Amino acid sequence: MVQAYILIQTEVGKASTVAEAIGKLTGVIQAEDVTGPYDVIVRAQAETVDELGRMVVAKVQQVDGITRTLTCPVVHL
């Protein structure tokens, strides 16, 4: 199982709507709207890195109101 944090920038005033929509997606553990340089932070999981990438591109980035994402895979050192 691969987990990652997805940092999301949204259009002004869309953070809550984006977090709510993403929170309903399969593979999303948690989606929170936050303050700072990013508007929403998501914790997601998938079976493989490739599946995680497909989820971000095919599902997360398609949510209306998102302007940019940054995916940060969790590593265990």
Image (spheres, rainbow, N blue to C red):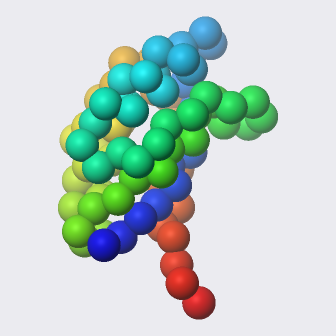
Could you say which is closer to the camera, residue 44 or residue 50?
44
Q: How many circles with numbers are drawn on the protein?
A: 0
Question: Percent x, y for residue 15?
Answer: 56, 20
Asked which quadrant contains residue 60, the reply is: top left
**Residue at 47%, 15% in the rendered image:** 17
Q: Residue furthest bottom?
A: 77
Question: Percent x, y for residue 14?
Answer: 54, 14
**Residue at 35%, 59% in the rendered image:** 45
Question: Percent x, y for residue 41?
Answer: 57, 41
Residue 35 makes an appearance in the image: yes
Residue 50 makes an appearance in the image: no
Q: Which residue lies furthest to the front in this view?
A: 29
Quarter of the image with the N terminus is bottom left
Question: Percent x, y for residue 27?
Answer: 29, 49
Left or right: residue 57 versus residue 35 is left
State whether residue 73 is above or below residue 7: below
**Residue at 61%, 29% in the rendered image:** 33
Quarter of the image with the C terminus is bottom right
Could you say which is closer to the camera, residue 31 or residue 52?
31
Q: Which residue lies furthest to the right in this view?
A: 36
**Residue at 46%, 61% in the rendered image:** 4
